[in-house]
Image (cartoon, grey):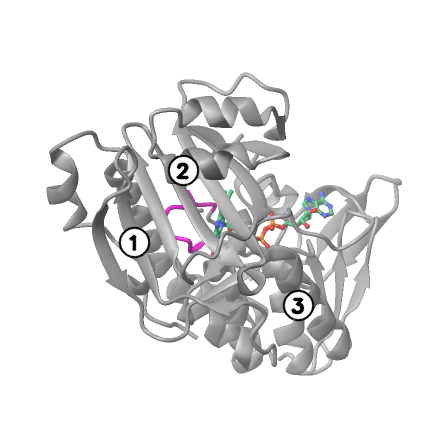
Amino acid sequence: MIIGAEVTVLGAGIGGLAVATALAQRGANVRVLEQADEIAEVGAGIQISPNGVAVLRALGIGPVGGASSAVSLCDGASGGQVLRMALPEGFELVHRADLITALAAAARDAGVQIQLGERVESVDADGTQAVLRMVDGTASRQDILIGADGLHAKTRTAVLGDIAPFFTKQVAWRALIPGRGEPAEARVFMGPGRHLVTYPLRGGALTNIVAVEERASWAEEGWNHTDDPANLHAAFAGFCPEVTDMLAQVEAVNIWGLFRHPVADRWSRGAVVLLGDAAHPTLPFLAQGAVMALEDAWVLADALAVHDSRDQAFAAYQAKRKPRVTRAIEAANANARNYHLAGVKKTAAHAGLRMINAVAPQR
Ligand code: FAD
């Protein structure tokens, strides 16, 4: 049904740009509406496992990062290695800005119209066509509206009702520092109630830091803000010199309250279908949130190309994606517990740690 179909995608994040490109390459007329005035990502790294890299390649996007050869789990206090898992070929460590730039270029090359500064106020999914109302008061009707508008998605509200995301009792700091000649792999330094992940970016020119701490509550307004690097340093004060030396180099840092929803029970209503974080936000401890959005994009575009009706395509997409995404999210939740154990429980628990390569490619 896809040739010549008019499709609107809400959100120019990783998921939105990927699905827009996949659909345009199959013959659809696609436009993307994005509230921001420019296409940008947070200044941080992202790990893309082979199942996500496979989608990028299928979209015609070449390597945008460096290869990753292993994940090493280290005791945060001593720095000693607990476990090293060699990764098969195909894992990439990518700067988010480089990935989003490549995705936007691929979308434009495929003929996608990207409209910036377009903020959607509300979505109504009750009729056969969706009604999209913009903050400037204009409204339009859509035959196919793909909700790739992230954790606070208006499209999710249209499909499932207005339910606020819940705080996972974890916060994450993200920072970049100058490269330190580390190996091309991800290292996880673990301690009670906290862990820190680090890996090189852009051929070692930068080192990416993601540091997570358990917190009882998130009292701040909004869900991310800048923080004083001293707070990050203090949170990891008992960690080994390698970690404290790295944190001493942090000059600017943001902190996120990690919020999520359960995996959506239904992924579509009428003309609206959800994708990526709008359908299934996850804790980042399996490095699969963006990768699942890339897989969603490919599977949804295929379903729309193969099935005769929109409703059949949406049903086939949900049936294929929901069980797999649910498994990945459960594995990420298990890692949250295992990474933050104290003392002797640690080594035994890590035998059961789920890693990103446990999720085989789905395209
Ligand atoms: P988003 O990236 O949230 O994009 C949504 C877009 O919609 C935005 O551009 C937004 O501006 C736009 N939008 C929203 N509302 C409106 C509106 N009303 N009108 C118009 N536009 C709107 N995943 C991995 O795969 N690997 C990792 O290593 C990894 N590490 C992570 C580390 C941390 C600390 C965190 C927090 C997450 C991590 N993730 C990782 C998860 C990943 O970042 C997300 O799952 C992914 O970015 C979701 O993409 P998305 O396109 O679904 O949504």
| Vertical position of residue 301 compared to residue 335: above or below | below
Mark 3 residue element: helix
Please provide percent x and percent y for residue 236: 40, 28
Please provide percent x and percent y for residue 67: 45, 70
* Magenta span: 281-288
- Between the C-alphas of marks 3 and 1, the distance is 29 Å
Assess whether mark 1 and mark 3 are in contact (beta carbons under 8 angstroms). Answer: no
Magenta span: helix, strand or loop, mainly? loop
Q: Amino acid at mark 2?
A: Val
Residue tagged 3:
103
Q: Which one is earlier in the sequence, the residue at label 3 or at label 1?
A: 1
Q: Nearer the viewer, residue 33 or 105?
A: 105
Name which residue lies at 61% across and 67% down. 18
Q: Which one is earlier in the sequence, the residue at label 1 or at label 2?
A: 1
User: Counting other residues with Cα less than 10 Å from the Cα at mark 3, is it few (<14), some (14-19), or many (20 or more)?
Assistant: many
Name which residue lies at 47% across and 57% down. 181
Name which residue lies at 56% across and 75% down. 63
Residue tagged 1:
72
- Between the C-alphas of marks 2 and 3, the distance is 33 Å
